[in-house]
Image (cartoon, rainbow, N blue to C red):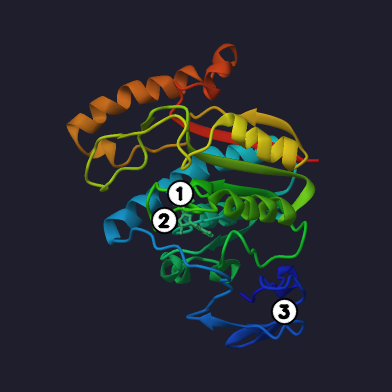
Amino acid sequence: MSRDVSLLACPKCGASPLGAAPDALACAACGASFPIVDGIPDLLVGERFSDESGCDVWENEEKTGRFLASNYLLPLVQRLFPGRDPRSLRVLSIGCGVGSDVEVLGAAGYEAYGVDAGGRPQLWRRRSHPERFFFANAKHLPFRDERFDFVFLCCVIPHIGVVGDTYVTAPGYAEERQRAWDEALRVLKPGGQIMLSAPNKRCPLDLFHRKFHWVHLPRVHSPFEGFLLSVGEYREQLVARGGCRDFEVLPLEGYWGFFISSGYWLGRLLQLPIRLVFKLMTWEATRWLRGTFLNPWLVVRAQKG
Ligand SMILES: C[S@@+](CC[C@H](N)C(=O)[O-])C[C@H]1O[C@@H](n2cnc3c(N)ncnc32)[C@H](O)[C@@H]1O
């Protein structure tokens, strides 16, 4: 299928449209040219994210992304846009990694797009809509303003402004993240919905980032570290700075497939209390717990004003 260049804007100067040639996209305003590498436009401005790679990591991400999109994102989008025909909604996964979430949403009828600045784009060619993926930086998105109804960033903001693929923040990380916040809200339509997720800064056990993926122990961290964000920081960005309304911390059931931990007996044992906590926070009476240190994983949502 052909690429819809009418959505695109130059990630360097913001001008649109971009001129399309078979092997490049070009900006007439600033003269920048962006090569199309193996079918995927390279619209990266700024640094590439040097992330962990390897077939077993990618295989897990593939399954996790499919599970997340089928069990969590699809019901969420249906709830947020009741009665809407999926074909009338355009959605964007920023930092989509392997892109299986985008594929599931696309198969459900949504016009789903993905961008990422790491090492996964080589996997996008096999997607049913490879023309909807762009190698790009969350801080310089290659889209025109107000194009998307639903924008989501699953565990992406903490990885911006860090040293390599670590949990150590680099000088200036707050400004770098600010660019990503501004860009995510810029491409969202007024009235559109934004969702973000990542481990909870206030929970001292980070179950999702480990030194090596084969070490099955949580990362113990300060509840004030710079790497992760708290509910208060999400609210500050979305509501106070971003002008969003209807801010909500979402329940977690259906988010995680627990694929790695289900593969060994200790993991199956350790996932029980986590599943219980996830279940506990699903109920209305206990929703206040979702923002506390007891919750290891935050999912927040808001509507652009
Ligand atoms: C922890 S992974 C999450 C991937 C996927 N969203 C998921 O939930 O499985 C973080 C992703 O963010 C991407 N990323 C990090 N910094 C980025 C940036 N500045 N722009 C775009 N993507 C970025 C990485 O390449 C990686 O794919």
Specify which label sits upstream in the sequence, 2 or 3: 3
Tell me the amino acid under the disc marked 2. Answer: Val
Q: Is residue 5 above or below residue 168?
A: below
Name which residue lies at 37% across and 25% down: 274
Side of 172 relative to 81 (left or right): left
Q: Which residue is mark 1?
A: 169
Mark 1 packing: few (<14 Cα in 10 Å), some, or many (20+)? some
Nearer to us in this view, 3 or 115: 115
Rendered image: mark on residue 163:
2
Pick the front one: 103 or 214: 214
Q: Amino acid at mark 3?
A: Leu
What is the residue that sits farthest to the front in this orientation?
A: 171
Residue 288 coordinates in the image, percent (x, y): 58, 17
Identify the residue position indicated by label 3 in the image: 18
Residue 250: image x %, image y %?
Answer: 58, 29
Sooner in the amino-acid sequence: mark 3 or mark 1:
3
Q: Is residue 191 left or right of residue 214?
A: right
At 58% across and 30% down in the image, what residue appears? 231
State the SS at label 3: loop
Q: Secondary structure at mark 2?
A: loop
- Quadrant of the rendered structure where residue 236 is? top right
